[in-house]
Image (spheres, helix red, strand yellow):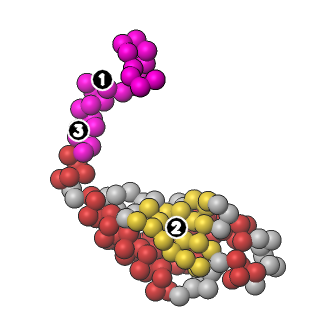
């Protein structure tokens, strides 16, 4: 179990020269385009913007870099019982609304919306995404 011997493990897709060359190029792009720094900067913009709106639907905004989550408030959703039976249903509806406006986000764990934009996201694209998210969270 502690050591793999020849013939005990195989892979048809990993470790071949092409896969290794592609991996090396991907790492070079990450370095050359400073995508880690972009992820940190854009992620902070994302979290700061949503927090600054002070919306009652938003219980918490959290994340690191460009992997972020918005927690939808159970209490704020309760005032909307006529439209939604639960905070989970409201969260799903918010994701559907964002999709209608052109942004894909994933509901997870019931009342959490996960956002994971590409590392290459530009300032303009982040501005567009934030506008869509704001419209959805304002139930527009």
Q: Can residue 102 be seen in this snapshot?
A: no
Q: What stretch is highlighted in magenta?
A: 1-27
- The picture places residue 109, in percent across and down from the top left corner, at 64, 60
136 left or right, relative to 36: right
**What's the distance in space between the residues labelled 1 and 2, CA to CA?**
36 Å
**What's the distance in space between the residues labelled 2 and 3, CA to CA?**
31 Å
Q: Which residue is labeled 3 in the image? A: 24
Disc nearer the start of the sequence (2/3): 3
Q: Please tell me whether mark 2 sits on a helix, a strand or a loop.
A: strand
**What's the distance in space between the residues labelled 1 and 3, CA to CA?**
12 Å
Q: Please tell me whether mark 3 sits on a helix, a strand or a loop.
A: helix
Q: Which of 66 and 105 is in front in this view?
A: 66
Reply above or below: 120 against 1.
Answer: below
Q: Please tell me whether mark 1 sits on a helix, a strand or a loop.
A: loop
56 left or right, relative to 133: right
Identify the residue at image location x=38%, y=22%. 3
Reply above or below: 121 against 1.
Answer: below
Q: Which mark is residue 69?
A: 2
Q: Residue 16 carries which label?
A: 1
Q: How many C-alpha atoms fall within 10 Å of the one at disc 1: few (<14), some, or many (≥20)? A: few
């Amino acid at each position: 179990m502690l050591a793999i011997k020849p013939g005990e493990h195989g892979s048809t897709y990993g470790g071949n020269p092409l896969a290794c060359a592609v991996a090396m190029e991907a790492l070079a792009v990450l370095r050359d385009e400073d995508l880690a720094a972009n992820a940190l900067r854009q992620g902070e913009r994302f979290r700061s913007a949503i927090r600054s709106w002070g919306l009652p639907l938003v219980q918490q905004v959290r994340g690191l870099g460009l992997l972020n989550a918005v927690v939808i408030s159970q209490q704020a959703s309760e005032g909307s019982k006529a439209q939604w039976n639960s905070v989970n249903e409201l969260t799903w509806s918010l994701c559907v609304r964002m999709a209608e406006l052109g942004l894909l986000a994933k509901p997870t764990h019931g009342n959490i919306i996960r956002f994971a934009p590409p590392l290459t996201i530009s300032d303009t694209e982040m501005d567009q995404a934030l506008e869509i998210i704001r419209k959805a969270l304002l139930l527009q």
